[in-house]
Image (cartoon, helix red, strand yellow):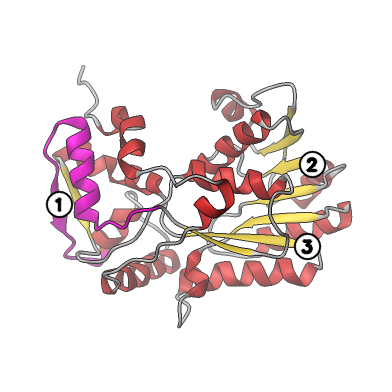
Amino acid sequence: MILVTGATGNIGRALARELDVRGEKSRLLVRDPARARAAGLPPSDRAELAVGDFADPDTLTPALTGVDKLFLLTQGIGTEHTTAVVAAARAAGVRHIVHLSSAHVLLDPVPAMGRWHHERERIIRASGVPATFLRPGGFMTNALDWLPTIHAGDYVLDPVGPGRYAPIDPADIAAVAAHVLTGHAEEDEEYVLTGDETFTVAEQVRIISETIGRTIEVRATTTPDEIVRFRFPHGAPPALAAAVTEGFALMRADTVGVRTDTVERLLGRRPRTFADWCVRHADAFRRPATA
């Protein structure tokens, strides 16, 4: 039995589908059954829902009962949820944890965003449960954070200018996670996951514009608030805002961009392209019809 946390998110939903296609039994951890049903979960009779919350450790024990492998995705900037889940997993006899970490842990010096992920990795390693760490860079779905300014004024704020990165489709992360969870990769490995192409923000926006047939302007950010809004349209707590600002400064300085062949090496195919992702999400970028 495989327990999938974050099951209603972009990666979790895709992972649930991947495991279903492979005929694997899974349990999908959700906080809100209604949201899970709206997301189309569970996908088949091979999957079951478990209601639980990282903030309530008493809900984790039944969710982990009978689980052999755990896909662990924890959000936010703290480590207390990781500590609680890993302790419950160890007590339940989980034999393998596949943890969604971040490529930020590899930077030197490690930025704030990377330090949180690094500490989560340390907690997992200290548990003694065999683990595999998936370390993606930027997600293609982060472009959905630009929807408020695209819909309101056909523009995107750009905090990184000449900086380049290779965003990855969350579906590819899910495919790698399924590959690892079903025993097709080594335990105790660390995989850096990227897309196959590097982009500036302006280049990504150009692809979105071409996909939806509408010009979208790129505006350089001029204030710390605009920098944060690029990633969190509705703002972020001070510690997270500071980490985001630091991270984008590092991205601006990287005019080459990190790219790996991990997806192709593990899955035997190249990663999905940003252009293809834009086609699949074109309706989201088109301005909503007015009443």
Q: Residue at x 79, y 67 (%)?
A: 127
Compute the Cα span from label 2 to label 3.
Answer: 19 Å
User: Mark 1 = which residue?
Assistant: 218
Quick check: is 202 in the magenta stretch? yes
Find numbered disc 3 in the image and state the secondary structure of the residue it sits on: loop
The residue lying at 34 percent from left, 36 percent from top is 276
Q: Are marks 2 and 3 in contact (CB under 8 Å)?
A: no
Residue sitting at 47 percent across and 58 percent down? 261
Residue located beneath label 2 in the image: 63
Disc 1 + disc 2, Cβ < 8 Å: no
Report x, y in % for residue 206. Answer: 18, 45
Estimate how packed mark 3 is, as few (under 14), some (14 to 19) or many (20 or more) residues with alpha carbons within 10 Å.
some
Indicate whether 82 appears above or below 13: below
Disc 1 marks a residue whose amino acid type is Val
Residue type pointed to by label 3 = Pro
Relative image position of residue 101 (x, y in whole percent): 57, 61
Q: CA distance from mark 1 to mark 2?
A: 45 Å
Q: Residues within 10 Å of mark 2 (few under 14, many from 20)?
A: many
The segment highlighted magenta reads 196-224
Find disc 3 in the rendering and name its residue: 130
Looking at the picture, tell me which residue is in the foreground, 182 or 65. 182
Q: Residues within 10 Å of mark 1 (few under 14, many from 20)?
A: some
Mark with earlier residue (1, 2): 2
Quadrant of image for the C terminus: top left
Q: Is residue 64 left or right of residue 4?
A: right
Numbered disc in front, either 2 or 3: 3
Q: Are marks 1 and 3 in contact (CB under 8 Å)?
A: no
- Locate residue 125: give its quadrant: bottom right
Residue 21 position by quadrant: top right
List x then y, in percent, for residue 16: 63, 35
- Identify the residue shown where x is 72% and y is 63%: 83
